[in-house]
Image: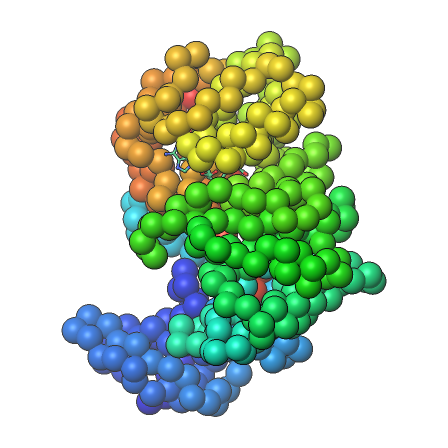
Amino acid sequence: MRLTIERMTYGPDAIAHTQEGKTVFVSGAIAGDVVEAELVSDGKSFSKARATAVLEPSPARVGCDWPLASVLGCAPWAAMAYDAQLEAKRANVVDALARVGHLADAEQLVRPCEAPGSPWHYRNKAELAFVRDGRRATLGMHALDGTSVIKVEDFPLLDTPAKGPASRIVKNVSGALGYLAGSHDLDIERVGIRRSSRTGDVEVAIWTPTGAFPRTQACRVLESVGATSIVRVMTKGPAKARKVAGVERLAGAGSWSERIAGNVMRLSAPSFFQVNTAGAEKLVDLVLDALDPHENDIAMDLYSGAGTFTLPLARYTSFVDAVESYGPAVRDLRRNLEEARLDNVDAVGGDADREFPDDEADIIVVDPPRAGLAENVVRQLSDQPARAIAYVSCDPATLARDLARFREIGTYEVKSVTPVDLFPQTFHVETVTRLYRR
Ligand SMILES: C[S@@+](CC[C@H](N)C(=O)[O-])C[C@H]1O[C@@H](n2cnc3c(N)ncnc32)[C@H](O)[C@@H]1O
């Protein structure tokens, strides 16, 4: 079947229509391509297809030096020129606001997509799958089709120092664990690598179930990989709802630090931190710009994590109420505040809805996970006297739903939505929305 690709979805696929007008989600193609495609599934309202040949390439089609980009799930848009990626991300945000949030002025609200860093080598973190077949071990990434783990020794999305052992960290860790697997029953679920070219910190986190682990031997083989910290994160519970049971320091610092927006943040392996430091710094800029903090202000930071926005807000305001539900992140936040000598923050561990601060805030930042804000959090925020709310979101659809709820209640007006590209070569997009009190 010959298809002309119209646009990208908020996902790895692109969209085309058959001559009869049926929507087809096409993998392996980008907007502007004309492709030959084979049907993968044919549903009632839409079909799925896979491009088998590019008949006429899109003007936005570019070559990519990384051969694994098209097979791994981590760079599904790598065949698209970077400018076209930014435009497609903005279009997806407009589409979500219009379709999900029914915001008729979506096109006017959404600004051009910001591109704060390099389109490659931007990640401070690599998450690698570990699979064993007898004594052979593979450290790699899941293939786009989810059927296998492909060995990865070079990961060009990872921030890479020019020299030193840390420049080959993925290859080094792969070699070390492969060697160890030859003589030990290694029950490893995955391996996380965090690296900062700003602080020089490199952390290797080995995720395993609780129970026996050859820690002495693991330390010995990992000694020369170039890490400043090696930890074991122990997990328990059923596969789909695995919980962190504890973090054990195997060697070095036992945590990882990053410098961002004039602050140093120290993080334990399971705590959230944006994978793109330059991008996170742009978010801080946009949030501060939206909130315009004054020294007598009371600020609120819901879903604060380890303090990306809490620390700058604490420097510019008189007091910050921070709420974060994940224990290790709350501990990181308290330690980061202590090290920065900031004592004007109440760092509360708990759910943002149940632990919603009693204070009346002047300015508020919220940065929830993909699920967005609980309906009651929107209600509680709408009851606040704050002059401005900055809503940082990583999911355009839940953002759209929440903005529609803010509009319905009516105390806050949506002024603008700025997309920020923290995840080049992928469809993911972060946004900062400004809401001002009417
Ligand atoms: C997208 S992260 C943002 C963290 C932080 N603002 C940052 O930029 O590093 C979302 C955070 O919300 C936390 N979280 C998830 N559900 C929550 C809830 N119901 N109440 C409070 N925090 C929650 C997560 O643990 C995570 O740290």
The scheme the figure's colours follow is: rainbow
* Tally of numbered tags: 0
* Residue 73, x across and y down, in percent: 48, 69
- Would residue 406 be seen by someone viewing this image from the given angle? yes
Seen from the viewer's position, the closer of residues 97 and 356 is 356
Q: Residue at x 73, y 66 (%)?
A: 168
Seen from the viewer's position, the closer of residues 320 and 415 is 320
Within the displayed image, which quadrant is ligand 1 positioned in?
top left
* Residue 316, x across and y down, in percent: 65, 19
Q: Residue at x 46, y 33 (%)?
A: 327
* Residue 324, x across and y down, in percent: 45, 30
Seen from the viewer's position, the closer of residues 195 and 250 is 250
* Residue 223, x across and y down, in percent: 72, 58
Q: Residue at x 64, y 42 (%)?
A: 255
Q: Residue at x 60, y 80 (%)?
A: 67
- Would residue 391 be seen by someone viewing this image from the given angle? no
Residue furthest out toward the left = 44
Relative placement, left or right, of 178 versus 349 is right
Q: Quadrant of residue 84?
A: bottom right
Q: Quadrant of residue 290?
A: top right
Relative placement, left or right, of 54 versus 380 is right
Seen from the viewer's position, the closer of residues 225 and 94 is 225
Q: Quadrant of residue 4?
A: bottom left
Which quadrant, please, contains the C terminus? top left
Which quadrant, please, contains the N terminus? bottom left
Residue furthest out toward the right = 163
Relative placement, left or right, of 413 versus 192 is left
Residue 33 drawn above or below residue 36 = above
Residue 317 drawn above or below residue 60 = above
Residue 97 drawn above or below residue 44 = above
Relative placement, left or right, of 111 versus 407 is right
